[in-house]
Amino acid sequence: MEIRRLTPFDAEIYREIRLEALKLNAEAYSTRYEDEIERPIKIYQERFRSNYSFTLGAFESEKLIGTVTVIREQHLKLHHRVNIVAMYVKPHVRGLGIGKALMNEAIQRAREWEGVEQIHLTVVSSNESARKLYSALGFQVYGTEKQAMKLGDTYWDEERMVLFL
């Protein structure tokens, strides 16, 4: 397996895996599939050029099988923080350590940004495997938001987690 930063040339394959994630695990993301499918590809290309965020991709036999995005806070008072979002591993390769490898690489690269002291993420409370992974990596729950997301009559609680570097 190879993990590398995605570039604007990866925008098409990223879009495919992103749409899959939103379709298969809608409860895990605040973005809806129906909204994301309308986004032009150039949005991803621009995102991958940013100096304040990066998206890592895990590749097996040149196929994208997992992703994670790290975004640095831009406000001066929050510049010591980064956020991990859009974590996803394809179902057929879950349980093989790909998520852990992506997270370890994301944490390591976040440490390389000068002044970063904290890594934050949010996880749906019912996603036990993700919660276990993040806890095993040293993330701690600092709050739970009840009914954080709602679609139709269904609510999802979210846990806020932090890793102090």
Image (cartoon, rainbow, N blue to C red):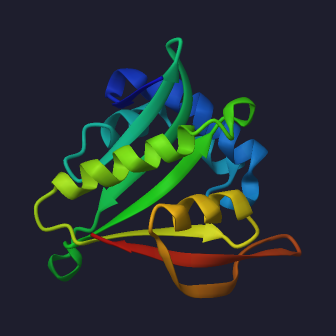
Q: Position of residue 8 (x, y in %)?
A: 33, 27
Q: Position of residue 70 (x, y in %)?
A: 36, 53
Residue 92 seen in the figure: yes
Which of the two residues, 61 or 124, is positioned nearer the viewer here?
61
| In the rendered image, the vertical position of residue 6 relative to residue 153, given as above or below | above
Taking the spot 72% from the left edge, 64% from the top edge, the residue there is 128
Taking the spot 32% from the left edge, 37% from the top edge, the residue there is 48
Q: Quadrant of residue 29?
A: bottom right
Q: Is residue 136 left or right of residue 109?
A: right
Q: Residue furthest right?
A: 153
Taking the spot 36% from the left edge, 44% from the top edge, the residue there is 105
Q: Position of residue 126 (x, y in %)?
A: 76, 69
Q: Quadrant of the C terminus?
A: bottom left
Q: Residue furthest front?
A: 136
Which of the two residues, 133 or 123, is positioned nearer the viewer here?
133
Q: Quadrant of residue 153?
A: bottom right
Q: Is residue 112 left or right of residue 38?
A: left
Taking the spot 59% from the left edge, 44% from the top edge, the residue there is 88
Which of the two residues, 135 or 76, is positioned nearer the viewer here?
135
Residue 30 seen in the figure: no
Q: Residue furthest top?
A: 61
| In the rendered image, the vertical position of residue 91 relative to residue 157, given as above or below | above
